[in-house]
Amino acid sequence: MTSHDRWILRTENTTYAVALATEGPWAELTAWGPHGAETGPSPLDWSGRTHFITPADAAPAEYIPYGLRPFTGADLVAQRPGEERGVWWTFSPEQTETTDDTLRLVFDDEVLGLRVALCYEAVPGSDVILRWSELTCTGEDELRLERFDSAAVNVPVTAGARLTFLTGQWAQEFQRTELELTRGRFEMASTQAVPGHAYAPWLAVQDAAHPADGKTPTYGVALEWSGNWHITTDAEPGGAVRIRAGRLPHEGAVRLAAGATLTTPRLACAFSPEGIDGLARVWHRYERHLTGDRMNRTRKVLYNSWEATGFDVEAGSQLELAGIAAGLGAELFVVDDGWFPGRHDDTGGLGDWYPDPAAFPQGFDHFIGEIRSLGMDFGIWVEPEAISPKSALHSEHPEWVYRVEGRPATLVRNQLLLDLGREDVQDFVITTLDRLLTDHAISYLKWDMNRPPTERGRPGGGPVEKQDLDAAHVAGYLRVLDHLRAHHPNVTVEGCAGGGARIEHATIARTDVVWPSDNTAPLDRLAIQFGYLLAHAPHTMSSWVTDAPGVFDPRPRSLGFRFVNAMAGVLGIGADIRTWSPEQRTEAARWIARYKEIRDVIHHGEIHLLNTPADATCGIQYEEPGGGRIAVTAWNTGRLDGAPLVPGRAARLRLRGIDPAARYRDAASGTEYRGAHLLHSGVPFPWTDRYDAELTVLTRL
Ligand code: GLA
């Protein structure tokens, strides 16, 4: 597996090979691709001739510090406070460790007193390699780290990069976007204490000369960090494409005390020879691995009353909704924002996490009992990091809020943010959630977060340059989520941040589902979900059927379209079902029953994205492990004027990756197909003005 200066990590289908450079003390990527890619001369080999830059600047260097790589982008910038910036390290072969699945390359700068371990781990059963760095202050003086990325990733492309990324804003998250980067820098980042709505901490890279779809080798990275981050891609003038990714500390730099070790967040690096769609499957498998045993837990059909009643939460209307929801087949009833005192609008209440006696006159437990007697589980919404200025909590603990002494506090959504990095705040949140979850029969928690920290300071918290508020907040958030997992293992947790602003691997690993966007309008949601599914697995994707009109795309769509859309992930209902006609309710019950039959296929299956929402017909193919069943969710995003016009032909979606010789039956229509037909001609969808979505289930004969 290793020679003295070359190390090879293998995942199920890929190889990642690293060698020590001959020109200096750094490691270089020599291969990343399918097994066997490491044989032959490295495609990243360069001439060795440099003018005006150093060899390290031109080399496909793995993690390398400023000092050694002064001009083209370094991953680590360190100094003793007040002294020159730069690290000049040497390789420490005796500290370097390797196993079949791991590698730890160690470099030391004895003058500065810094040891850096470049850590690699191949994730079993996946095509993901995790990379991170461990920085230890080995001297007697503390160090100042101005940049301490997790990893630098060289991408073996030759004609510049096509970057695919997921961008947007509130209500428009996860928009798939492409950019050709042949020279220059492209940076995505967030300083909002959460990954943010603007960019997902996720990037896919292909050779710009190859087609985006089809069997194009595709590389991806995703950062496991719930706070401030950046992913920066450089297409260097010499042709190299190199990604740096890591944290952005709120204070601009962090201090590393003598003897202390800072471990960076992990950067997951993925490869697929099958394009963006294949890369999505790699990420899905990895997220199933992160979910672990909780993959075996059936994700229940939820009803959430937020879009029906808003802040007007009171037992009577909630029970009316619950009765109808149970009749439709919902298995879980969640009361969203508004169940606690002072929460009649968004100006009050946050922090005082007690059921509002006025809303539940017979008591909260009586109310929960009524919901449960309908055969449903019960859940609530919380926003534990948030605080309303007029809450009781704020008058008791104004010091718990992020603030800068002498500066006015900005209100965002009329609220402030607690400094969850403080241990007393974490303890308050844990005690509060423990109380709610033990005093009441609550088995579902939607954890929301609706504002970024402004005036982010901690008066009395010691010298600012020694603080690391962003990392402390993330640690507090993860501590509470870990506590919930350990002490309330039967409670299902939904992650939310004003829609999809906090979705990354640390959150995915500690929640059961996440809420990708507040936009539930049918065509808008479809585009959001197609983007979301490039990075994240269907079993994590909470999705509701609502009455919402289009926000960005106002074209009307049927109830069936909304159901097929929501069942492409974890189905929920958020509509005001009191207003639904008997026919609509019958149709809804039918969809829910069908979903229950195939949700295992949706949540555990391998997916292929068939076209995109920009095409008139698009769909998602889910193949059950073992191939026994295939579910296809299909949508007509095109005209609803009866097209295809009579006499027209049905739209078709060609399936992918199935056995051409296999035989399948569509039980609903009784039609039998050969795999070859499904691959070559596809499943027919004879859309009409009213028939604009379908769920087709094919059983292998
Ligand atoms: C955020 C969430 C919504 C809803 C509201 C409640 O916007 O994303 O789903 O919970 O808060 O205030």
Image (cartoon, rainbow, N blue to C red):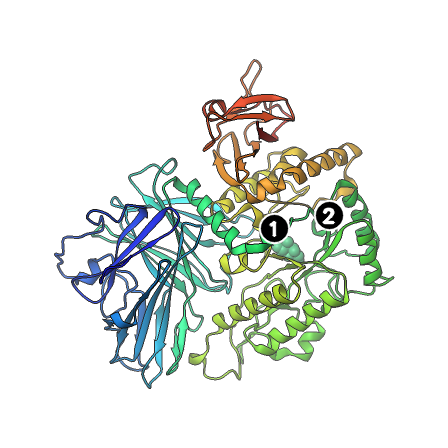
The amino acid at mark 1 is Asn
Disc 1 residue crowd, few under 14, some 14–19, many 20+, Cα 10 Å: few
Which residue is rendered at x = 57% and y = 48% of the image? 539
Q: Is residue 552 visible?
A: no
Q: Looking at the picture, how far across and down is residue 406, in whole percent? A: 54, 80
Mark before the other along the chain sequence, 1 or 2: 1
What residue did someone put label 2 on? 331
Instruction: Determine whether, in the image, residue 387 is placed left or right of residue 173.
Output: right
Location of the C terminus by quadrant is top right
- Report the residue at 25% width, 52% height from top: 240
Q: Report the side of 30 relative to 321 (left or right).
A: left
Question: Within 10 Å of the Cα at label 2, are there few (<14), some (14-19), or many (20+) other Cα atoms?
Answer: many
In 3D space, how far apart are the residues under numbered discs 1 and 2 (Cα atoms)?
Answer: 17 Å
> Does mark 1's beta carbon lie closer than 8 Å to ligand 1?
no
When asked about the image quadrant of residue 420, the answer is bottom right
Q: Quadrant of ligand 1?
A: bottom right
Residue placed under numbered mark 1 in the picture? 296
